Amino acid sequence: MFKIIDNKKVEMTLDEVQMYDSLLKSHEPYGKELFKNLFEVNEEGIIVYLYPPQKKFSLEVIIFLQNLMLHQHLRIIYKEHDEAIKEMKSEMELLKKELKASSKPS
């Protein structure tokens, strides 16, 4: 799921969107302003850089962005790990079949 934050497409889970909305509500009426110029994202909506705040800021917002960035990168790592394990398992099955076939008496 994607959410637009500071005119940037950001990849987020439903829980993260709810936390973001909660932060906006708790900092009304200037909640969205607290997210301005604090981060950069790549084409997939993954936060790749956090800027230090240059104006009034909320520690809650900074910690939220740090955690969001961390969770995004962990999701990528877990996905790559799961895909590698799946590929290794299928390769192992092929090797087992080849080994069985080659060890059968002719």
Image: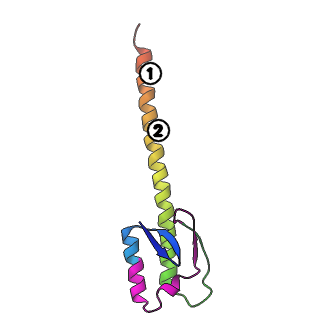
Q: Residue furthest front?
A: 7
- Tell me the residue at 52%/65% (across/down): 46
Determine the secondary structure under disc 1.
helix
Residue 31 falls inside the magenta stretch: yes
Q: Amino acid at mark 2?
A: Met
Which of the colour schemes (rainbow, by chain, secondary structure, one colour) is used? rainbow
Element at label 2: helix
Residue at 49 percent across and 81 percent down: it is 61
Tag 2 residue: 88
Using a 10 Å C-alpha cutoff, classify the residue at mark 1 as few (fewer than 14 neighbours), some (14 to 19) or many (20 or more).
few
- Determine whether 87 is above or below 97 in the image: below
**Percent coordinates x, y for residue 40 in the rendering:** 59, 72
Which stretch did the figure color magenta?
A: 20-46
Locate residue 22: give its quadrant: bottom left
From the viewer's perspective, tell me whether residue 100 is left or right of residue 45: left
Q: Amino acid at mark 1?
A: Leu
For the C terminus, which image quadrant?
A: top left
Q: Which residue is mark 1?
A: 99
From the top left corner, tell me how far across and down residue 103 is, in percent: 43, 15
Q: Spatial distance from mark 1 to mark 2, Cα to Cα? A: 16 Å
In the rendered image, residue 23, in percent from the top left (x then y), is placed at: 42, 83
Quadrant including the N terminus: bottom left
The residue at 43%/35% (across/down) is: 90
